[in-house]
Amino acid sequence: MTEGIAYLAGDSAKHAATLSIVGESKAVLHVGDQSIEASIDDVSLSDRIGRLPLQLRFPTGELFIPHKETELPYCFYVPSKSWLTKLETNLSVILSSVAASVLIVALFIWVGIPAISQGIATSLPQQVPEMVGEHVLEQLDNGMFTASELPEDRKASITNQFERVVARMPPMPIAPKLKFRNWPKGPNAFAFSDGTVVLLDPLVELAETDEQLESIILHELGHVYHQHVMTALVRSTMLSVTVALVTGESTGVIDLLTGFGVLLVSSGYSREAEEESDAFAAKYLYEQYGTTESQAEMFRLMQSESARVGIVEWLSSHPDTDRRIEAAAQYQPE
């Protein structure tokens, strides 16, 4: 006989029990005064999973768990643990596997997704960034921006300046266009995935020269040229879609891109993207004027404005301003 514990059908209580074999074909489970009989072929044996105990289930629902598996009758013989089972029960292997999984996920997030996002962003049909940019600007117009109050002749002059700047730029992935908006939160400018550059009234009023304003225009065109906006949106969407696939929660990809676009505009780009756009602006300022002093001057104006009224929105999520001023002042072409 094999001693163990049993759970009767429809009863969650644990009972002391014994298992015996009668003849060559019948298994008998003894629980107190009860005896449950079944053909050996009808008694199912659980798979071996990790450290879980072996279980024998009778066709009428009773469950028997032996105290010692080695005392089971030969007809219920269970081979020694396989290599897979041994791995499943080895603590060092489990911890190593968890660590390796975390490392792989981290590498995928920090290295894989950015690289994949860049490739996807550059290969998307032009209709996608256009649609996303339009939706993002529409939402911002409904919740953040108001109509520009700049004089029409001032807007026309800046538009002509913008077109001249674009004309001397390298080929852009999408045609840039300029729009004006107002926002009470301070000087700011934005680039959108559809190539739209938005200048806010406080920023235009802060600039003292056309060259200073041009440094901002060039910075935003740097975002357009390097497709920072769409790359960041694709990266965020990939993370969100991955979670959606795992959890079963799904939504429209365009809606996701639009939502992330509003968040991106509100919170700023990554430091790496900002520094790349600063370098882009410095390069073409130097080519045009032989100096990048106007870029440094614009940073100083923003820094002074920040000290006067609090953090300037355009600087709030950007790299350290002193370092940007120094980089602009000391720029040398490669």
Image: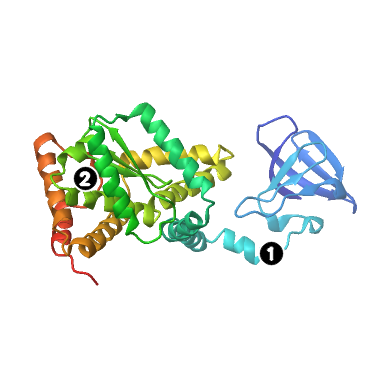
- Residue beneath the point at 32% across and 48% down: 269
Front-lying residue, 313 or 148 = 148
- CA gap between label 2 and label 1 equals 66 Å
Q: Residues within 10 Å of mark 2 (few under 14, many from 20)?
A: some
Front-lying residue, 149 or 326 = 149
Whether the residues at callouts 2 and 1 have beta carbons within 8 Å, the answer is no
What x and y, as percent, mark residue 142?
38, 27
Q: Which mark is residue 315?
A: 2
In the displayed structure, 299 sits above or below 306; it is below
Amino acid on which disc 1 is placed: Ser
Lateral position of residue 78 relative to residue 87, left or right: right
Front-lying residue, 96 or 331 = 331
Q: Residues within 10 Å of mark 1 (few under 14, many from 20)?
A: few
What x and y, as percent, mark residue 229?
39, 49
What x and y, as percent, mark residue 299?
16, 50
Front-lying residue, 171 or 85 = 171
Amino acid on which disc 2 is placed: Leu
Check disc 2 and report its element: helix, strand or loop.
helix
- Residue beneath the point at 23% across and 32% down: 151
Please give the count of numbered marks on the rendered protein.
Answer: 2
- Please name the colour scheme applied to the rendered image: rainbow
Q: Which mark is residue 80?
A: 1
Q: Looking at the rendering, which quadrant does residue 10 occupy?
A: top right
Lateral position of residue 92 relative to residue 1, left or right: left
Q: From this viewpoint, is residue 21 visible? A: yes
What x and y, as percent, mark residue 209?
14, 47
Q: From this viewpoint, is residue 270 visible? A: no
Lateral position of residue 283 relative to residue 258, left or right: left
Check disc 1 and report its element: helix, strand or loop.
loop
Quadrant in which the C terminus is drawn: bottom left
**Mark 2 or mark 1, which is nearer to you?**
2
Q: Say which label, 2 or 1, has the lower sequence index.
A: 1
